[in-house]
């Protein structure tokens, strides 16, 4: 696969190495150009094709393409009938859009602390957070590592709750030999340019029950019972009905034209990520200064959207923020995914959250950082990261 690598990271020298960059190959470019030349770039046949391909890839009956994971999460909640007075359980260790999507429905986000080793919601603590108002659980497969889904779905079944998996990081991940999306209730993926595959911003939902899928299709496009292609194509019918006050969450054909070839290469790209992760893991074995991704007690495949380490300030002799700044001096960019949501002022002021409420998420939030990882990253580029860390920590 030949990739387009931005000039500033094409050399293995001292040019700035970003923590990620989209992996756009010639086939992806040609597909987007063909869509542009076709004159039809709005929602249409390419979105239909992309949804079909996604359903096939995910082994899931219904896929609904949208313009971001954020809108997908909101759409899923609304389609499940969640709104004012309801509660939705999720994790504090996520991007704010997970929690915001709950707030936008009028429901209240209820946070449950994470596990020390997976950084995912601690499933053993979920039951204690359930009240008569609880309507759904929104677990996040953080960094691409699957949440322990079997016990989570047992709880959902027991209390008759919907499960909307925030799989923004997890396309291509699996849990106990089953692909995320191939089982369960609802999963939402992000195709933001820094994710494992892209549609240049965009997202999708996999959903296992037809009724909910139908609601999502209507709600994603103004509540109209037909999309633009159904109205303007030769076989289309120009008349329309509005059956709900819907949203403008549809994916365009131009986005889908990027997604179709990207999806074909997803597994190949994820294998490349895995190889790079293995090299990092080998290099950092036995280091006290940082904690690399840890062992997980259940069978899984992590698509590794992010390679997150924790900085142990005592052993490292510096904080996470200081280490990120030092690596910048080596021309290496890092990410911060993610500060715990309940530490931001809005959520503290609105929901009375405070430091101390979720101690594990806070420790991780204070220490976490993401090292560069993208499929087309060369061994030489990765060696620069490893060498810089060795120099910083005086390792041979
Ligand atoms: C866990 C998580 N959920 C949701 C999102 C939202 O994705 P999008 O940018 O496609 O809306 C992100 C984005 O980074 C995320 O990390």
Image: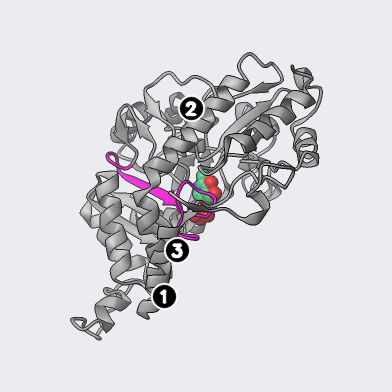
Q: Which residue was labeled with disc 2? A: 122
Residue 205, image x and y in percent?
Answer: 36, 53
- Residues packed near mark 3 inside 10 Å, few (<14), some (14 to 19) or many (20 plus): some
Q: Residue at x 43, y 18 (%)?
A: 297
Q: Which residue was labeled with disc 1? A: 36
Q: Residue at x 53, y 44 (%)?
A: 376
Q: Residue at x 31, y 59 (%)?
A: 50
Q: Which residue was labeled with disc 3? A: 29
Q: Residue at x 63, y 38 (%)?
A: 381
Q: Is mark 3 in CB contact (under 8 Å) with mark 1?
A: no
Q: Judging from the image, what secondary structure is the residue with disc 1 in?
A: helix
Q: Is residue 324 left or right of residue 53?
A: right
Bounds of the magenta segment? 181-202
Q: Is mark 2 in CB contact (under 8 Å) with mark 3?
A: no
* CA distance separating discs 2 and 3: 42 Å
Residue 278 in view, yes or no: yes
């Amino acid at each position: 696969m030949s990739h387009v690598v931005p000039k500033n990271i094409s050399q293995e020298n001292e040019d700035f190495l970003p923590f990620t960059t989209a992996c756009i190959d010639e086939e992806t470019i040609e597909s987007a150009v063909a869509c542009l030349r076709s004159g039809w770039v709005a929602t249409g046949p390419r979105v239909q094709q992309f949804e079909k391909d996604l359903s096939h890839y995910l082994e899931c009956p219904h896929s609904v393409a949208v313009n971001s994971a954020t809108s997908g999460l909101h759409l899923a909640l609304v389609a499940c009938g969640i709104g004012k007075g309801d509660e939705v359980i999720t994790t504090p260790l996520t991007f704010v859009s997970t929690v915001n999507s709950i707030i936008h429905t009028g429901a209240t986000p209820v946070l449950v602390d994470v596990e020390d080793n997976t950084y995912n919601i601690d499933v053993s603590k979920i039951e204690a957070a359930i009240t008569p108002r609880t309507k759904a659980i929104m677990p996040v497969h953080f960094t691409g590592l699957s949440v322990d889904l079997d016990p989570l779905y047992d709880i959902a079944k027991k209390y008759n709750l919907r499960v909307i998996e925030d799989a923004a990081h997890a396309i291509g991940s699996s849990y106990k030999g089953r692909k995320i999306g191939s089982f369960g209730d609802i999963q939402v993926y992000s195709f933001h340019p820094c994710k494992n595959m892209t549609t240049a911003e965009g997202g999708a939902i996999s959903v296992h029950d037809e009724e909910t899928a139908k609601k999502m299709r209507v709600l994603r496009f103004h509540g109209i019972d037909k999309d633009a292609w159904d109205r303007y194509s030769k076989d289309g019918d120009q008349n329309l009905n509005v059956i709900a006050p819907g949203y403008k969450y549809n994916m365009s054909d131009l986005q889908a034209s990027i997604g179709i070839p990207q999806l074909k290469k997803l597994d190949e790209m994820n294998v490349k990520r895995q190889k790079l992760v293995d090299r990092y893991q080998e290099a950092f074995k036995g280091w006290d200064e940082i904690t690399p991704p840890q062992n997980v007690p259940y069978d899984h495949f992590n698509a590794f959207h992010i390679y997150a380490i924790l900085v142990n300030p005592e052993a490292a002799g510096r904080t996470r923020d200081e280490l990120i700044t030092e690596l910048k001096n080596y021309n290496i960019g890092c990410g911060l995914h993610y500060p715990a949501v309940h530490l931001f002022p809005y959520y503290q002021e609105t929901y009375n959250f405070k430091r101390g409420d979720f101690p594990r998420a806070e420790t991780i939030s204070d220490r976490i950082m993401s090292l560069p990882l993208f499929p087309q990253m060369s061994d030489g580029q990765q060696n620069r990261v490893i060498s810089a860390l060795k120099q910083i920590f005086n390792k041979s």
